[in-house]
Image (cartoon, grey):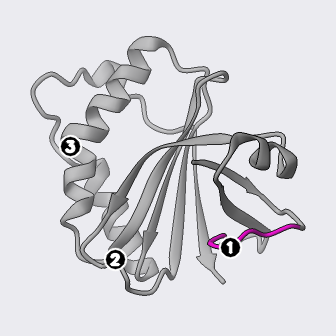
């Protein structure tokens, strides 16, 4: 599966209409069965590398957080991020009340990634962000390689 994050005219089924908090800018988070379909909609295409389902799955998607690692990420940072995701962040999100669902989008050519998360409220999104950023590292994680995202964008789900 592939994804685009762009204001597009042709909106496929299952796409999410988003409005950025603070600017009012609108965008569409769209999912595509094929890379070709995604490329017809946008010049920036991501592959869906992983999905996460939280305990509030099926609940309202009120807030969407996009966490960008613009890259290019070194192989060491790429591996460290994947390790942190699998061992620490994903298990946390799967058990956090208020987390609906999300995914990890990657561009392997540009070596960049976007973490997408939907929450039942802005308060829950804020709680989740603070909790993830204050978690203790698990054995095997190197804090020097976990330099954080390049930017975080917060959206209202329309």
Disc with the residue nearer the chain's start (1 vs 2): 1
Q: Left or right: where does residue 121 sit relative to residue 82?
A: right
Disc with the residue nearer the chain's start (2 vs 3): 2
Q: Nearer the viewer, mark 2 or mark 3?
A: 2
Residue drawn at x 21%, y 25% is 141
Q: Main secondary structure of the magenta part?
A: loop
Disc with the residue nearer the chain's start (1 vs 3): 1
Residue, far left: 139
Q: Badge 3: few (under 14), some or many (20 or more) residues near its Cα, within 10 Å?
A: some
Tell me the residue that label 3 is attached to.
Answer: 88
Q: Badge 2: few (under 14), some or many (20 or more) residues near its Cα, within 10 Å?
A: some
Residue drawn at x 76%, y 65% is 27
Q: Quadrant of residue 156?
A: bottom right
Label for residue 62?
A: none
Q: CA distance from mark 1 to mark 2?
A: 19 Å
Residue 16 locus on image (x, y percent): 64, 72
In the displayed structure, 53 sits above or below 42; it is below
Q: Secondary structure at mark 3?
A: helix
Tell me the residue that label 1 is attached to.
Answer: 13
Q: Quadrant of residue 19?
A: bottom right
Whether label 2 touches label 3, CB < 8 Å: no
Rendered-image quadrant of the C terminus: bottom right
Residue 91 locus on image (x, y percent): 19, 52
In the displayed structure, 27 sits above or below 152; it is below
Q: Left or right: where does residue 29 sit relative to residue 75?
A: right
């Amino acid at each position: 599966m592939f994804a685009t994050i762009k204001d597009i005219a042709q909106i496929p089924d299952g796409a999410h209409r988003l409005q950025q908090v603070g600017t009012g800018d609108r965008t569409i988070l769209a999912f595509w069965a094929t890379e070709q379909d995604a490329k017809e909609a946008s010049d920036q295409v991501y592959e869906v590398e992983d999905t996460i389902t939280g305990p509030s799955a099926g609940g309202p998607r009120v807030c969407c957080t996009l966490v960008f690692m613009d890259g290019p990420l070194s192989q060491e940072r790429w591996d460290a991020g994947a390790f942190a995701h699998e061992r620490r962040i994903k298990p946390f999100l799967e058990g956090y009340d208020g987390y609906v669902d999300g995914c990890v989008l990657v561009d392997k050519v540009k070596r960049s990634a976007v973490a997408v998360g939907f929450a039942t409220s802005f308060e829950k999104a804020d709680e989740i962000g603070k909790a993830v950023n204050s978690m203790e590292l698990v054995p095997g994680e190197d804090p020097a390689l976990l330099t954080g995202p390049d930017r975080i964008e917060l959206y209202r789900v329309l």
